[in-house]
Image: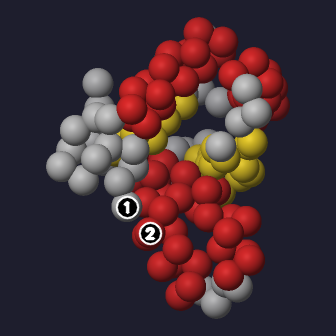
């Protein structure tokens, strides 16, 4: 599983795609996140919840909540959750609009989706419990 990472600027107004982490196991993913938090001086984390189209939580959303709790425990930071429905489709549309190749969209898609999700939160979008 791939995990897109986006960061905001110091003023918390602009989101930028940063990198994609490959989830090979919880321990290695948490180590990478803890390292990133230290290097980038992260103060909070947003985790996207892949809700069903009717807004309910399925197995994937519950797995995202479990991951968020592990990240909170490993980093000591507040973890927020946000509805991520349609962010991948929105990211693809934006990359097509910018002339990104199919290969480029595949490689950058998770990072761009993460940036769109974070931008929504920075703009005052709703966070989920």
The residue under the point 32% across, 43% down is 51
> Residue 47's x, y, as percent?
49, 35
Residue 21 makes an appearance in the image: yes
Q: How many numbered circles does the render carry? A: 2
In space, the residues marked 1 and 2 are separated at their CA atoms by: 5 Å
Name the element at disc 1: loop
Q: Residues within 10 Å of mark 1 (few under 14, many from 20)?
A: some
> Residue 13's x, y, as percent?
49, 52
Give the residue pinned by disc 1: 86
**Whether residue 6 is situated above or below residue 61 in the rendered picture:** below
**Whether residue 32 is situated above or below residue 8 in the rendered picture:** above
User: Looking at this rendering, what residue extends furthest in the front direction?
Assistant: 59
Q: Are marks 1 and 2 in contact (CB under 8 Å)?
A: yes
> Residue 101's x, y, as percent?
70, 85
The residue under the point 75% across, 42% down is 22
Answer with the quarter of the image where residue 49 lies.
top left
* 123, 19: nearer the viewer: 19
Question: Is the image coloured rainbow, by chain, by secondary structure, or in one colour?
Answer: secondary structure
Name the element at disc 2: helix
User: Looking at this rendering, what residue extends furthest in the left direction?
Assistant: 54
Answer with the quarter of the image where residue 29 lies.
top right
* 70, 80: nearer the viewer: 70
Give the residue pinned by disc 2: 89
């Amino acid at each position: 599983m791939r995990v897109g990472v986006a960061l905001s600027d110091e003023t918390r107004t602009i989101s930028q795609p940063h990198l994609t982490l490959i989830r090979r196991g919880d321990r290695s993913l948490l180590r990478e996140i803890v390292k990133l938090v230290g290097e980038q001086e992260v103060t909070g984390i947003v985790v996207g919840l892949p809700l069903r189209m009717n807004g309910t939580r399925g197995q994937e959303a519950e797995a995202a909540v479990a991951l968020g709790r592990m990240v909170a425990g490993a980093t000591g930071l507040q973890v927020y959750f946000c509805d991520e429905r349609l962010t991948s489709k929105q990211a693809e549309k934006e990359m097509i609009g910018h002339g990104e190749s199919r290969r480029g969209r595949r490689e950058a898609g998770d990072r761009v989706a993460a940036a769109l999700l974070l931008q929504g939160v920075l703009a005052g979008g709703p966070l989920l419990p």
